[in-house]
Amino acid sequence: MIHFVLLISRQGKVRLTKWYSPYSQKERTKVIRELSGLILTRGPKLCNFVEWRGLRVVYKRYASLYFCMCIDEDDNELEILEIIHHYVEVLDRYFGSVCELDLIYNFHKAYFILDELLIAGELQEPSKRTVTRLVAAQDSLVETAKEQTSSITNIIAQAAK
Amino acid sequence: MNPFSSGTRLRDMIRAVRACKTAAEERAVVRKECAAIRASINEDDQDYRHRNLAKLMFIQILGYPTHFGQMECLKLIASAGFPEKRIGYLGLMLLLDERQEVLMLVTNSLKQDLNHSNQYIVGLALCALGNICSAEMARDLSPEVERLLQFRDPNIRKKAALCSIRIIKKVPDLAENFINCAASLLKEKHHGVLITGVQLCADLCKVSSEALEYFRKKCTEGLVRTLRDIVNSPYSPEYDISGITDPYLHIRLLKLLRILGQGDADASDRMTDILAQVATKTESNKNAGNAILYECVETIMSIEDDGGLRVLAINILGKFLSNRDNNIRYVALNMLMRATTLDAQAVQRHRATILDCVKDSDASIRKRALELLYLLVNENNVKPLIKELIEYLEVSDQEFKGDLTAKICSLVEKFSSEKIWYIDQMLKVLSEAGNFVKDEVWHALIFVISNASDLHGYTVRALYRAFLTSTEQETLVRVAVWCIGEYGDMLVNNVGMLDIEDPITVTECDAVDAVEVAIKRHTSDLTTKAMALIALLKLSSRFPSSSERIKGIIVQNKGNLVLELQQRSIEFNRFLQKHQKIRSALVERMPVLDEATFSGRRAGSLPTAISTSSGAPSNLPNGIAKPATAPIPDLLDLSSDDVPAPSSSGGDFPQDLLGVDLSPTLAPSGAGKPPKASTDVLLDLLSIGTYLPVQTGSSASHILSSSQDDKALASLSSLSANATSPVNAAPMMDLLDGHGPGPQKPTENGQAYQSLVAYESSSLRVMFNFSKQPGSPQTTLIQATFTNLSSNVYNDFLFQAAVPKFLQLHLDPASSNTLPASGDGSITQNLKVTNSQHGKKLLVMRVRIAYKTNNKDVLEERQINNFPQNL
């Protein structure tokens, strides 16, 4: 099971955190600090796994961002690499060649996508198309709702005149 | 409307945060935003609620506290619209976790949303439930989730399946409710549902044996078929990853089959064909394929199999191990570790490659490889492997040395068939990486050295050589200093020369030099310096000719700023000066340590062995040994009824004396307390940094007394009976504390001299008691006792003395400056007189005594010429 997902920039800034196991706010800060120290310092050609507190952290760097997932010792590290890539590909599809700035300003979108991919630290959907379709469908629900409110506000505003 | 919250949009806030150049600026922006959000929350502002929450989430990601927004999540979730709910649930998962009580308040909203007509809202609720639900919520909402497992939309079914995993993990009792629904998910065609269904079954098997039996009987066949279909499926673009259709599904199916096959030959038998197919047919040039192979190997090794498949699996791992990709090598090492219990021989074949991995540039691989290699070492290969590892130790990274050293030490100890090999290897490790050696390791080494009586000479010479070349390794210095102290005579005289040794010429002076280096080295820590002081004391008796020089070094440390060292120096100096007669007995060689007791102590200590998670037997604990089984505390355990023969114990632990905190105030005060458990045999013996006031105080006293007087034995047995009386500590105080109060018997140490009434008037009497230290006839120790014969108290009492040039006089402070009236107490003061013309001239002294009585200054002077002849 995946215990948490972290997105950390090369400068050590946190871009996204998702916790599937309970960690208090204090522990979270500590975990992030420890892992940034461990991962950001590793050289480019080394393996993508770090052993940490009896768990394994699988990380992969995409441009300036490190995608990290923490798993149990007996989980399949190679598969987690595929899941990370899977996530990145969906992000890429959704944003259209995603970059770090997309994830900063639209962090909630990155979360919505992650929530369609993983629940309870387990993989939910192997099809990228399905994930993008589901997120898009919910986005359009939001859009419709917004239009409705704004049209209602307009009506009220006009009525008020 | 709130004037603050209307201002910034989410995007503007993010921009403002990003524009901050310093952490302080960022904090200021965040503080301002938080204040605005709080104000908005207080006004119950509905229009901006979801914008506020979005901002709070960003602030939370930055690592700032956001607990005040928790209730806003609940309000958003409770609102009707999808956009509000969507952001509300996201905030809930981000800002809360299962341990917060607030979470309980959301149960009702969740229940409503799970029954909502909009499937996306149902999806949101399932997602939140799956990610953060607590045990109570799991219990409350389990029926809803069960129902949703049969929902018409597959995207809800898959979410419900993962949600069920969380529920059964939180409340395993609920597992049986899910067995049937989970089994029906296995027949699904939708990959998302199938994957999550398989995962649910695997987790059900973990919490319920009933589920395991059920799936084993009913589903094994079907799962094998599903795996075969997916392995043989034609190209499907939606699920394809580098030429393989849905590797995630492959992996989950293999994982579930592993659980079903483990411990069941029948089920295992049914899956062998498909496992063989996966193991042979899967492409291994891409990560996805390797991930499947990796999972397949693990399944093959876990199920019941006759061995045919295992050969295949080990071969795959062999191929992995020679792969250029570090990730693949890492997982190979990981898996070989599990394979060692199944087929150690097969893993042994890859030993050379594994050894190369220990030397890899990648820390993760090195760590794995070292742990694996640790398991592979046996009696036959230990010597070449240790040789390799020690050679690598010289060039390895600093941060890896700790792990490596621990493993080497553990292995050397485990397979030490010959003591000389053990000592040799340990010396190499100490010279290379002594700073990384843990305390118990060098303690154990000293223990072994002490037991190998035929190797004492060899060891001390080898240590001396090593010490000359690498003085930077703390533990090497410690062991060397200890051995030089104990076996210094063997170092100098080449005693017990082995054939393999090169002769070495070391003078007494060289040996003392070495210890002096250790004590003066800046990097030496307290323990090392304290040990060096003890070594010096020991050498002073081993090398009588260097004894003056040693005394000089000890005296230099009398002014040491570290209290422990200062105290030791002063005490040792006193030994050297005053107690010549018992010194050689005190600094005798350490008795051989009792092996059974020592290993018993170590075995009983913390179980965190250096060994790996695989639980390889190791007798080298990391932790500090647990108290109370040591011979010393037992022997001296004053609260116990049966005290072992005190005579032997007294003679056996002379070291106690040396390390003891001899401060007289400690001994009586500690005497009544139950003895504190010590931490380690050697630590006890060397008494480094540990204070054992009770045991050591009393034991010291009885060692001393037994060395003087056999009657002490009797007093010792009474000592155990009424240990609380402070009187028991008195013998030690008498001997070691010259200016302590009470009856003084210093003459017992040396020749007895008659006391002298040096001065007597109608108002004052001065008595001199004389003693000499053995070995220094020139020096006379004088104890002056002043008694007031008048009926008035004397205040500001001051005694002064002057001597001619051929004498040297040293005055210690007086015990008091107030002399009570009518002989009701006395003042004592110690003098030390060194007669440079001993034998030719007699002592002579002029004394002056000043005091105040009835507010009147009195001055009395006198020359003393009647000292005994032989002083």
Image: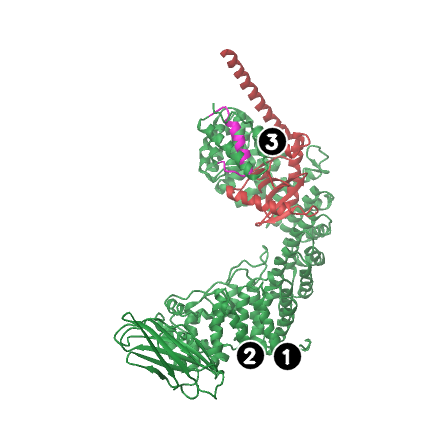
Q: Secondary structure at mark 2?
A: helix
Apparent side of residue B284 relative to residue B752 in the rendered image (left or right) = right
Q: Amino acid at mark 1?
A: Asn
Where is residue B95 drawn, in percent x and y?
Answer: 51, 36
Q: Position of residue B23 (x, y in %)?
A: 56, 39
| Residue assigned mark 3 | A105
Judge whether residue B445 is colored magenta: no
Which range of residues does the magenta coloring cover?
B45-66
Decide which of B235, A145 is in the foreground and name it. A145
Identify which residue is drawn at 35% across, 69% down.
B724
Whole-Å distance between the Cαs marked 1 and 3?
78 Å
Identity, as a three-letter code, of the amino acid under mark 2: Arg
Disc 1: which residue: B494
Quadrant location, the C terminus of chain B: bottom left
On the same chain, marks 1 and 3? The answer is: no
Label 1 crowd bin: few (<14), some (14–19), many (20+), radius 10 Å? some
Q: Name the image quarter holding residue A105.
A: top right
User: Marks 3 and 1: in contact by CB < 8 Å?
Assistant: no
Q: According to the rendering, which colour does chain B have? A: green
Query: What is the drawing colour of chain A?
Result: red
Q: Which mark is residue B721?
A: none
Q: Which of A39 and B311 lies nearest the eye of the viewer?
A: A39
